[in-house]
């Protein structure tokens, strides 16, 4: 009886949590979706005006502060977490020690020096999914997670975003 009550409590607690970022998306939003489908999944989107929908650009939803969705070639390519308390589906969040990524993912972590902050020891910690189709990349600074992004493996590695 006690075990059943614990399971019910855990299930109810999980319902109150915000969706976590996965390698293939966030909540109902999945990489490869069109802009209309992303808006259905994330709620009303704020986006640049007069944009070519096939170009690379970012949109955001007030439902997920600090989170940006990269659209390119007409579909969702990646989701960036730049601020706030959003975590990955493995529980990694901004401010966590970089060592936590290595503890969780072990030998799967590909470590590269940061393009601009390499002298300070900043790194990119990238983990690929099966077949290297999707990935999550953690950007570190000062030994902590500064930002992270997940989605299609190629766009996840773009250092300047759409740049």
Image: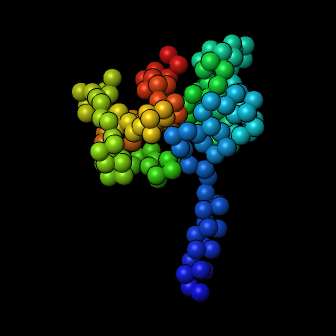
Please tell me how many numbered marks the rendered image carries: 0
Q: Judge whether residue 130 can be spotted in this image.
A: yes
**Residue at the spot 60% in from the left edge and 42% down from the top edge:** 26
Quarter of the picture containing the N terminus is bottom right
Q: Quadrant of the rendered structure where residue 52 is?
A: top right
**Residue at the spot 67% in from the left edge and 43% down from the top edge:** 28
Q: Quadrant of the rendered structure where residue 127 is?
A: top left
> Is residue 104 left or right of 37 when viewed as pictured?
left
**Residue at the spot 63% in from the left edge and 42% down from the top edge:** 64
- Give x and y (percent) for residue 92: 44, 49
- Give x and y (percent) for residue 87: 51, 48
**Residue at the spot 36% in from the left edge and 48% down from the top edge:** 105
Instruction: In the rendered view, tell whether residue 68 sits above or below residue 94.
Output: above
Q: Judge whether residue 86 can be spotted in this image.
A: no
> Is residue 121 left or right of 136 when viewed as pictured?
left
Instruction: In the rendered view, tell whether residue 134 sits above or below residue 52.
Output: below
């Amino acid at each position: 009886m006690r075990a059943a009550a614990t399971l019910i409590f855990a299930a109810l607690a999980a319902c109150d949590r915000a969706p976590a970022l996965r390698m293939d998306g966030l909540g109902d939003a999945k990489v490869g979706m069109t802009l209309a489908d992303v808006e259905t999944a994330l709620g009303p989107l704020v986006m640049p005006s007069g944009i070519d929908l096939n170009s690379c650009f970012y949109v955001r939803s007030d439902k997920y502060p600090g989170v940006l969705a990269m659209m390119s070639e007409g579909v969702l390519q990646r989701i960036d977490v730049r601020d706030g308390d959003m975590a990955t589906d493995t529980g990694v969040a901004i401010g966590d020690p970089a060592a936590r990524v290595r503890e969780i993912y072990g030998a799967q972590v590909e470590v590269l020096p940061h393009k601009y902050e390499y002298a300070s020891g900043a790194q990119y910690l990238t983990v690929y999914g099966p077949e290297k189709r999707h990935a999550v990349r953690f950007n570190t600074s000062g030994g902590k997670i500064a930002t992270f992004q997940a989605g299609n493996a190629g766009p996840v590695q773009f250092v300047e975003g759409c740049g």
